[in-house]
Image (spheres, rainbow, N blue to C red):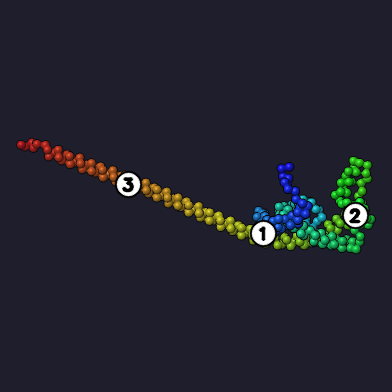
Amino acid sequence: MVFKRRDKRPNLVILRDFLWPKTGWKRAYMYVKHRLHRLPDPPHRIARGMFAGVFTSFTPFFGLHFFVAAGLAKVMRGNIIAALLATFFGNPLTFPFIAASSLKLGEYLLGLMGHATSATPHTDDVGVGVTLWRNFLAIFNEEDANWTFLWDFYDTIFLPYLVGGIIPGLIAGTICYYMTVPVIDLYQKRRKGRLLQKFEELRAKKAAKAAEDAAVAAAQKAEKARAKWEDARDAAEEAAEQAARVQEEMAQKAADLPDRGE
């Protein structure tokens, strides 16, 4: 394949790069920060997008956070790009805390504290994805679809996570909203001021260049006028000298003529 790695990475290296990229999370944070600041929308629309992305990070829709955040931002009339970038609030460093707090709070709100995670343990539980795949294949073979594990997963994991993530998601999203509005507003004003200053500097340079070009053109015109004046002066002097020579020749000829009275 064209984009396949030449040297396959070990599983531990893949896990390490996932949890801590080579460039570090600080570089990723700075990229997201500058990308948010340079969005063209007003600060309140960018902040709404931030709220949508951060709130989505507290939902159990893993793998669908981008779509959920984009849809929520569209409903709120927020910036969709800001919402997508804000979903990075949920990352391998924060997800353990988000998941634990959302699950515990959801269990408390639903009255599931102290209850077993599943009423009937299953020896063949291999995960939601595998169970869904087996149930899908059951359509084409003679096996029976088993939805018990999925219902247990929904009751004990998904629903508590979904309910428990609402309150911390609203709190975190609201904090990010009110922190984002003044920061982005200040950044955009400063950026607009810097752009205006650069524009004024470019306009001043353009005016100076135009004045310099005008001065050069005026100097060239003056030089041409001076050259024409010198040419006219030289032509006048030459004409005067020629007229003087003609007058002198005529006077000489008149002197050489014999006197008629003799």
Q: Earlier in the sequence, mark 2 or mark 1?
A: 2
Judging by the rendered image, the residue that carries numbered circle 2 is: 152
- Closer to the N terminus: mark 1 or mark 3? 1
Residue that lies at the very extreme toward the right in this rendered image: 120
43 relative to 139 in the view: left or right = left
Q: Residue furthest left?
A: 262
- Residue nearest the observer in this picture, 85 or 134: 134
Q: Quadrant of residue 106?
A: bottom right
Residue plotted at (23% across, 41% down): 242
Kind of residue at badge 2: Asp
Residue flagged by tag 1: what amino acid is it? Ile
Residue position for label 1: 184
Q: Quadrant of the N terminus?
A: top right
Q: Position of residue 148 (x, y in %)?
A: 92, 51
The residue singled out by tag 3 in the image is 229
Q: CA distance from mark 1 to mark 3?
A: 65 Å
- Disc 1 packing (10 Å; few <14; some 14–19; many ≥20): many
Q: Is residue 226 visible?
A: yes
Helix, strand or loop under label 2? helix
Q: Nearer the viewer, residue 211 or 106?
A: 106
Q: Nearer the viewer, mark 3 or mark 2?
A: 2
